[in-house]
Image: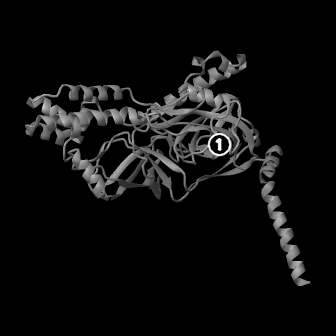
């Protein structure tokens, strides 16, 4: 009998916990509807990446050397700005890795005896504008180095008329385009926090990098993600019922929010229908009312994906969001798509008007291949031609071999090899995939920019919209 009573007690206790969890958003709504103020904890949770930009060029010398930067994007807790953009952050180089033998050998063949080494960095202190200093424990995510840009989706007004449906849609499109320009300006403002190197300095760095032995630098403007290993506590605030009465309501069409991608995506591996999740990094306000606080989860899926293929055909990727989950509020179904995304400058990423991304090939590939073919076609027995043929094949080492060797067949062979390698690299090899690493910054726009959400397990390119997207590329 005692065992039976214990079992029944456990069942009732579990049911009560489940009921309490399932009604938590409803309870928050009841407090809000009753006109009672709500106390909100202002915490920046573990795992939040601080977006850091290096404001000065830094030569990599040894482990332990100090490093300084600035917060590139503001950090919010619920609806309050807690770390402004431009806040100084300091840390150190924790480790400089060695170079694998294979990588060193390949670099040596190109007369590079100082190959790039991976550098581990940590940031451990914030210096807030009000004078406070906050201790941090962070981990800089691997591969996050690089000077980045923000790719903005194409203007909807430039699309065919059949994609524009009615005056209401056109009005929303106009509002979206205005907001996209604002997002782009915010990105440029963040970049202005650093002193961009001049053209002469960049040319000097490029020349030094081509020397057989050269130092390694982190350029001014390099952006890093410093992921928090411990939460940051900024106290709490009390919000009135009027301020939060619209929290969790569906955002108006044309609204654009800032978010960080939590699901890494790659057009080479991602599958159609795959779940995508992002988190808002700034609150969304409308007429002084809070609509979505920082920390709101955006859930969606991969709508269309095409991996890169041979003949230098680049990958394509389109994602959509169809659900939001604000903290302490019920989930809402929405339609949203990309309006902008950060990417490394050398990726040449472009977005169409509906947020579909493609890695475009630089036009300089035509010039590069043409130069190599021209050099191979004018091979001769003189010193200049032999030197150019050698340089076409293997950079500085090729130049030396071509200049010192008196063999015309060897020079011709090196010229043909260099031309063949250039043609293969620029036109015959596999194209570039669209890659969104974890914590990629995005601008997400609300509204019916896409006709429908994908179904998990559906086959690729089975809708008219997806076929038109693929054909447009």
Residue 132 visible from this viewpoint: no
Residue 15, x across and y down, in percent: 84, 64
Residue sitting at x 29%, y 34%: 420
Left or right, 370 with reference to 323:
left
Residue 50 visible from this viewpoint: yes
Q: Which residue is tagged 1?
A: 301
Residue 33, x across and y down, in percent: 82, 44
Closer to the camera, 95 or 98? 98
Residue 162, x across and y down, in percent: 67, 18
Classify 10 Å Cα crowding around label 1: few (below 14), some (14-19), many (20 and above). many
Q: Is residue 140 above or below residue 211?
A: below
Residue sitting at x 20%, y 45%: 111
Q: Is residue 355 above or below residue 89?
A: above
Q: Is residue 71 above or below residue 365?
A: below
Left or right, 215 with reference to 386:
right
In the displayed image of the protein, which residue is found farthest to the front? 409
């Amino acid at each position: 009998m005692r065992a039976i009573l214990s079992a029944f007690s456990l069942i009732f206790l579990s049911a009560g916990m489940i009921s309490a969890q399932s009604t938590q958003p409803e309870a928050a709504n009841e407090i809000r509807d009753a006109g009672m103020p709500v106390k909100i904890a202002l915490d920046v949770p573990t795992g939040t990446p601080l977006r850091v930009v290096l404001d000065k060029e830094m030569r990599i010398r040894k482990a332990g050397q100090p490093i300084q930067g600035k917060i590139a994007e503001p950090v919010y807790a619920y609806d309050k700005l807690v770390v402004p953009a431009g806040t100084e952050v300091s840390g150190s180089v924790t480790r400089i890795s060695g170079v694998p033998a294979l990588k060193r050998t390949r670099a040596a063949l190109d007369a590079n005896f100082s190959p790039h080494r991976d550098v581990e960095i940590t940031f451990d202190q914030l210096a807030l504008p009000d004078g406070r200093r906050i201790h941090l424990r962070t981990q800089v995510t691997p591969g996050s180095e690089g000077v980045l840009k923000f790719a903005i989706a194409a203007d909807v007004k430039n699309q065919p008329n059949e994609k524009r449906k009615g005056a209401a849609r056109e009005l929303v499109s106009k509002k979206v385009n205005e907001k996209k320009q604002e997002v782009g300006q915010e990105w440029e403002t963040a970049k202005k926090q650093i002193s961009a190197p001049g053209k002469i300095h960049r040319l000097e760095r490029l020349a030094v990098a081509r020397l057989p032995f050269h130092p390694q630098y982190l350029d001014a403007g390099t952006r890093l993600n410093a992921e928090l290993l411990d939460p940051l506590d900024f106290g709490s605030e009390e919000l009135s019922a009027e301020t939060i009465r619209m929290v969790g309501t569906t955002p108006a069409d044309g609204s654009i929010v800032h978010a960080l991608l939590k699901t890494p995506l790659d057009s080479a591996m991602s599958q159609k229908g795959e779940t995508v999740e992002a988190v808002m990094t700034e609150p969304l306000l409308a007429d002084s009312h809070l609509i979505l606080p920082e920390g709101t989860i955006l859930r969606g899926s991969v709508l269309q994906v095409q991996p890169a293929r041979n003949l230098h055909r680049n990958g394509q990727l389109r994602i959509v969001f169809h659900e939001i989950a604000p903290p302490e509020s019920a989930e809402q179904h929405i339609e949203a798509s990309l309006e902008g995304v950060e990417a490394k400058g050398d990726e040449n990423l472009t977005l169409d008007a509906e947020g579909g991304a493609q890695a475009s090939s630089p036009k300089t590939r035509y010039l590069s291949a043409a130069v190599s073919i021209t050099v191979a076609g004018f091979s001769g027995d003189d010193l200049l031609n032999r030197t150019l043929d050698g340089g076409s094949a293997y950079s500085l080492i090729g130049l030396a071999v071509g200049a010192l060797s008196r063999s015309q067949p060897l020079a011709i062979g090196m010229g043909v090899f260099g031309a063949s390698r250039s043609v293969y690299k620029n036109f015959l090899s596999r194209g570039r995939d669209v890659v969104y690493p974890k914590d990629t910054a995005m601008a997400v726009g609300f509204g019916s920019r896409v006709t429908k959400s994908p179904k998990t397990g559906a086959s690729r390119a089975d809708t008219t919209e997806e076929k038109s997207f693929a054909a447009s590329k």
